[in-house]
Amino acid sequence: MQVYFFDLYWGDERFVDEDGISHFDEGSALYYGQRIADRIGRDADYGSLKVHVRSGSGELLAIVAPSDGRGREQDALIGRGGLGVFRRPFEAAAVLSTGW
């Protein structure tokens, strides 16, 4: 197990991880960094969030941003009253025909 560090950067703010977390390998640490970015990136105040993943020796391994899906998820929650994604084509047709 190796220790990896996950520093958070958003706007002019930053949080430097001084403790780190043990992971089996680099891939596991990068996956964890993506999960951090996605969870925190849900909040509109952290839209510019970047997670810097560092190895135990301090080497920067990756800079991770919230996945595109989180932005779409937030847009869907904000725009609940409007047209959205329909599971069945006839739902879309019904809404479109009454909406115009």
Image: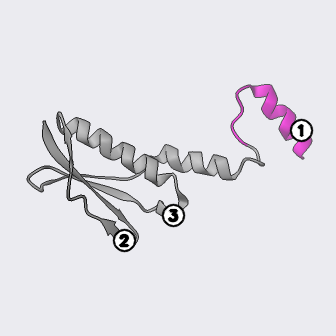
Mark with earlier residue (2, 1): 2
Query: Residue flagged by tag 2: what amino acid is it?
Result: Glu
Residue 12: where, in percent of width, then height?
Answer: 37, 74
Observer-nearest of 14 and 80: 14
Say what secondary structure mark 3 lies in: helix
The residue under label 3 is 45
The residue under label 1 is 97
Residue 56: where, in percent of width, then height?
Answer: 11, 50
Please rate how many residues cluster around mark 2, counting C-alpha atoms within 10 Å: few if below 14, some from 14 to 19, many from 20.
few
Q: Give the dominant element type of the magenta stretch: helix, strand or loop.
A: helix
The residue under label 2 is 13
Please rate how many residues cluster around mark 3, counting C-alpha atoms within 10 Å: few if below 14, some from 14 to 19, many from 20.
few
Mark with earlier residue (3, 2): 2
Magenta residue check for 95: yes
Between the residue at mark 3 and the residue at mark 1, the CA separation in whole angstroms equals 37 Å
Q: Which residue is drawn at 27% across and 42% down?
A: 30
- Left or right of 1, for residue 35: right
Residue 6: where, in percent of width, then height?
Answer: 26, 53
Marks 3 and 2 close (CB-CB < 8 Å): no
Q: What is the image's colouring?
A: one colour
